Amino acid sequence: MSTSTTVEYDRPPAYDWLTPSPREQVGWDVDVLYGPWPRHHRDASLAEVHRRLDRSPVCGALALSTRGPLFDDRAGNEETLRDLADCPELLPVGTVDVRDAMTAEDRLDELAAAGVRFLRLFTVEQAADPGFPGYRRVVDLALARGMVLLHDGDPRRYGPPLMDRGADVVFLDLHAYLLADFLLMAREEPGFRVTTRMLSGPDSVERVVHAVGARHLVFGSRTPFMDISPLTLRLRYADISDDERDAIATRNIEELLS
Amino acid sequence: MPIIDVHAHVGRWQFHLTCGDADENLRLMDRYGIDLQLVSASEAVVYDAVAGNAALTKELASRPRLYGYAVVNPNRIEESSADLRRCLDSGRFVGAKIHTHYPGRLPGSREMAEAFDVVAEAGVPLLLHTWGREVSQLPDMVAARPGLRVVMGHAGGDAWREAAHAAASCEGLYLEHCRTAADAGRIAYAREAGVPVERMLFGTDATLIDPCWSLGVLRDAGFTPAELDRVLWRNAAELFGLEVPA
């Protein structure tokens, strides 16, 4: 069927990657959810999320209940605030349903009153295009309140309308294939950031750091629906400085929180 | 312990990525302790199968840790059939690779059935790009060609549930889970569906994707050391007839 051969070379210590190292330590994961999700074959409770984070190198996370984006934004925000009130390692993220933007102002005022700084938009699940009136209304109201947008969807579509507005935006769904388009925007937008979740190329993280700086990258895993280790390993082996790694893993989000 | 990567590429891609000659593959292999890598030429996958396979033959000649897949284009089956034989005769190719997206042919098409016939006749394993629910047609396609072994590259992609059930129902199907979006629970789901660990393989999609992506998925899958031994290299060594350093 095939040829066989014996290969001789200096093999490095195998399976180093199997054990987490201090270089995988993450202060804040910006992309964590809990609760039912009909498209998945199993739901993920908050307890399950805690369990996964506890056995990972991730110390803290920005999280929210799936009730908000999938069913009821007001009840979902209340649930997130209630569930996370006693666990400082999980900071609550709010959301507003862009399909019902007539109520967005009330939702955002409730979130602001509760001290919530991050607003997550689910334009994929809520089928909202960047030109839809409801989406535009929600974005206008959130930016007027100085909120940081955690934004799903294709940054090539949602990024351009957010430029020249002084917006702090974290794009959650940037694939390595789309990196050049993001870098073109990030050159002009200091507030545009992207998570490492799908920057899977051998040099994607390095390209962001070298082209526009580590301040444009944050760690985001989408736990519990995605595996964590690919992302922490990518940080561990990235050809960047320890200071840049710390910024991506922790400091950039702490600056947004301050 | 050894590692064999059964899904990798040599060459450039059309994205903002550093991809180059096969030395880049070796650099990444050294970083993660990967001993052997089975590669197809990106040029052969996305552009010109015959020209890409020829260029890869030259790259393999001086790099014994790399083995080739000859890319078969289902749209040019006579040309690809002859080219597959040429590649295998070089002694540096151990299988065939068929993509679905670039040639625009899916399982269920007449062209893909003919391509399967060509690979079955050659008697080598097939690495098939799988992405979508048409993977459910693979058990019948494999059963109709005794002896054919198909590695489901990306394990179905977004159709990983369907891919798991397809593999569970057919001994000629293997799962290989490399993918950028690392959906949690894919491997556990496949095991619960009945796919034995003996038909799970390690692949990376390097140098399109950094190998740590797939290594991380394996770390989170919670395999025992004996299972890891199978998935990381032993299954591949048996399927492709490869030997690795002790």
Image: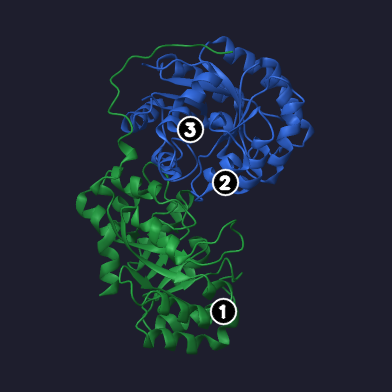
Chain colours: A green, B blue
Name the chain letter of the residue that bears numbered label 2: B
Q: Are marks 3 and 1 in contact (CB under 8 Å)?
A: no
Point out the tag, 3 or 2, that comes first from the N-terminus.
2
The chain identifier of the residue carrying mark 1 reads A
Read off the residue under disc 1: A72
As helix, strand or loop, the secondary structure at mark 3 comes to: loop
Q: Nearer the viewer, residue B67 or B199?
A: B199
Is the same chain shared between marks 3 and 1? no
The disc placed on residue B189 is 2
Type of amino acid at the residue the image marks with label 3: Phe
* Residue B79 visible (yes or no): no
Q: Amino acid at mark 2?
A: Tyr
> For the N terminus of chain B, which image quadrant?
top left
From the image, state whether disc 3 or disc 2 is nearer to you.
2
Query: Same subunit under labels 3 and 2?
Result: yes
Is the residue marked by circle 2 packed among few (<14), some (14-19), or many (20+) residues within 10 Å?
some
User: Quick one: SS at disc 1?
Assistant: loop
Q: CA distance from mark 2 to mark 1?
A: 30 Å
Task: Give x and y (percent) for residue B199.
Answer: 57, 30
| Amino acid at circle 1 | Asp
Residue A17 disc label = none
Q: CA distance from mark 3 to mark 1?
A: 41 Å
In the visual, does B196 lie left or right of A241?
right
Numbered circle sitting on residue B202? 3
